[in-house]
Amino acid sequence: DVKVTQSSRYLVKRTGEKVFLECVQDMDHENMFWYRQDPGLGLRLIYFSYDVKMKEKGDIPEGYSVSREKKERFSLILESASTNQTSMYLCASSLLGQGSIAYFGPGTRLTVT
Amino acid sequence: DAKTTQPPSMDCAEGRAANLPCNHSTISGNEYVYWYRQIHSQGPQYIIHGLKNNETNEMASLIITEDRKSSTLILPHATLRDTAVYYCIVRVRVTGNQFYFGTGTSLTVIP
């Protein structure tokens, strides 16, 4: 079974802190994605990566950065957390190719106070 | 710009078929249609996907119109555990293989 794990299910951070959210997949997938989910807005793509050290901006990259040093790991970084980044963060991975399936992790609910 | 359009909510009686519609009028010829669902506070779960032909698996059936501008997800015998938000997604090839989610349809299965 494909497994996508995220470092924390719940996280509470203070405004201005640097926050790292980590995602690990065990299926040798090339693609990895970070989304955030807010009530009424659905899932919005923050960043994605199709290879090690490669990254592409999604719809809402402002205030975030990412790192992919190893194929199985994709990190989302909030350089200086703000209250408007309180959200559910979801990681996903997939093989390259149009017909591949994206598998999601359980999500991290981040609260910035 | 929206890539898919779904009704915000639907109800279905337990044991009946649930038919969830999706419009994707700007779909390109080589873009797949995917369906996912999300139960509260969990990550989205893959259901089914297709390109041109109708598809069926153990969870659902996917009916894609001949012009590919719309599709319908069918849950043949809905159960209470099928209560979830269902997302119809067109995988965008031009900008790099992302999965773009809309706001989905909240399906409530009624006993």
Image (cartoon, coloured by chain):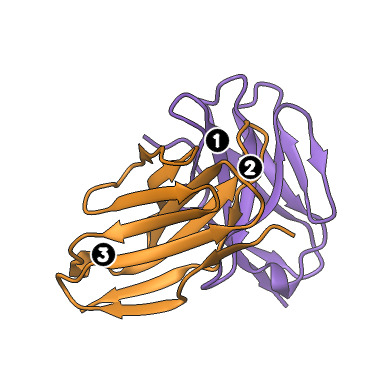
Chain colours: A orange, B purple
**Residue beneath disc 2:** B34
In the image, is A103 to the left or to the right of A37? Answer: right
The picture places residue A1, in percent across and down from the top left corner, at 75, 60
Image quarter of residue A13: bottom left
Residue A75 placement, left or right of B82 = left
Does residue A92 appear in the picture of this structure?
yes
**Residue in the picture at 55% in, 35% down:** B91
Where residue B36 sits in the image (x, y, percent)? Answer: 62, 53
Does the residue at mark 3 contact the one at mark 2 (Cβ under 8 Å)?
A: no
The amino acid pointed to by label 3 is Gln
User: Mark 3 against mark 2, which lies toward the viewer?
Assistant: 3
Task: Provide the residue designation for mark 3.
Answer: A85
Q: Distance between the residues labelled 1 and 3?
A: 26 Å
Q: How far apart are marks 2 and 1 (CA)?
A: 7 Å
In the figure, B55 relative to A8: above or below? Answer: above
Number of other residues with Cα within 10 Å of mark 2, as a class: few under 14, some 14 to 19, many 20 or more: many
Tell me whether marks 2 and 1 sit on the same chain: yes
Using a 10 Å C-alpha cutoff, classify the residue at mark 1 as few (fewer than 14 neighbours), some (14 to 19) or many (20 or more): many
Q: In this view, does A74 lie above or below B97?
A: below
